[in-house]
Amino acid sequence: MEKPETAVKLDIGDICVLVASPHRQIIAHVQDRYRDFLSGKGPDFEIEMAFWGDVDPAGFLDVPREMLLDFIERNLLVQRRIEQQDTSSHRQASYPLRTEDWRQRFWPAEESGEDSESRSRPKVAHLDHQILLQRSDFAGCMDMKARRGRNTFRKGMETIAVESFLRICYSFLAIEHEGLLLHSAGVLRDDNGYIFPGQSGTGKSTIASLATAKETILSDEMVVVRKSEGDYLVYSTPFYGTNESTEQNIGAYLKAAFLPVKDDEVYLKETRPAQALSRLLASVLFFSQEPSLNERLMGIATDVVARVPFYEMHFRRDASFWVCIDEMGRIGGI
Amino acid sequence: MISLDQVVFKDKQTASRMIVGEAIVLTPMDSKIHSLNDTGSRIWELLADEPTVGEIVAQIHSEFKVSEEQAQADVIAFLEELAAKGMVTLGESSREG
């Protein structure tokens, strides 16, 4: 990595990532947005971030230019729109235009249409030990062997592009550290951690918003679950949904997992192990197309289901589900 | 069209687990998680030995209370679905010996 002007270190799930950039604007953004998760530890991984336009994306990421044509073209279009609004600007684009059906060579068949989910999901390609990730707003790579990554995006896109790339990086790093980055609300209560995994709309934010003074929210959107000496710990993250970010970097013993189901009735229901595994996997943020990593993911998720009690939690929009959880604790179910 | 002498392989991209008799299969290309029912899980389990379609049909016919014709129709329909979801690939011809 070339000498950056400045850098900042983050600690999420007890995994430290150094973010470096020649642009103070990017570092200032990271320092402010993730201020409760700054770290002084030695980094497990390093990421360099630079603005598209100031670097040639293919050279910066060290990947074949044709693999980035989609990203380059999309960003050129945006740049042209900006330039058309500014009549004093007459810069010419210097990137080659698409001349062949390059897409078929590298990417799976395009889904028909582009809904918001497919737009937000990055395209992933594996090149030896490098993982190339791109979306309309950023292009990045992770070299798992060299323990470093790079990410480039347009000026003004820091908030979304940095957050998305960090989430993706941590999804891979968590697997490497025997953990999972999960779409899940996380709550600390009486020194025990509880998770409520589920995709959007399942009630994660609602559960977090119903916390009383007795509970500390680890996140209303994403937590890290990692194994430590035979037990699993749940960690808060700065990745949040509709509520504000937690202001504490906390790890706690994971006592139980509850799969939320919105209902008029409030009760806990036992889950079959396969059902728990299926629902847990559906909540994992993961993008690998690489069989050995997928196998590792499956192994960790299966182990979590074997070691942590899982229940389906039917709940309504009040805190009464905690009565059921406390009762389950009293009878030894968790 | 699937024929009885074709060999069935789990797709190499998938990751799967049998957990208390139920198979959970991850297909990374579309990031989908597939839960298989009893019969589906049994067929998935049989794929560990890379059987022919005919061998799967014979096994399902002997283990479940279905006629051979019914087992054949069900197994082929199921394998077509698995292939469409990228969970299995089918070899062109039967193994030698």
Image (spheres, rainbow, N blue to C red):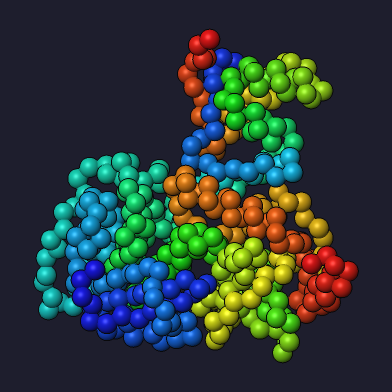
Residue A324, position as x, y percentages in the image: 84, 72
Identify the residue at the far front of this view: A229
In the image, A6 versus A116, the foreground residue is A6
Residue in the picture at 39% in, 54% down: A123
Task: Report which quarter residue B87 is drawn in.
Answer: top right
Residue in the picture at 11% in, 71% down: A90
Residue A47, position as x, y percentages in the image: 33, 69
Residue A299, position as x, y percentages in the image: 58, 51
Residue A21, position as x, y percentages in the image: 27, 76
* Residue B59 shows up from this direction: yes
Q: Is residue A303 above or below residue A329?
A: above
Query: Is residue B61 rendered to the left or right of residue A18?
Result: right
In the image, A310 versus A134, the foreground residue is A310
Residue in the picture at 34% in, 51% down: A129
* Residue A133 shows up from this direction: no
In the image, A217 versus A227, the foreground residue is A227
Task: Report which quarter residue A60 is drawn in.
Answer: bottom left
Q: Is residue A317 above or below residue A143?
A: below
Query: Is residue A50 rendered to the left or right of residue A252?
Result: left
Q: How many marks?
A: 0
Quadrant for the N terminus of chain A, please.
Answer: bottom left
Query: Is residue A250 rendered to the left or right of residue A259?
Result: left
Q: Is residue A210 above or below residue A332?
A: below
Identify the residue at the far top of this view: B97
Residue in the picture at 46% in, 66% down: A170
Identify the residue at the far right of this view: A331
Task: Report which quarter residue A141 is drawn in.
Answer: bottom left
Quadrant for the C terminus of chain A, please.
Answer: bottom right
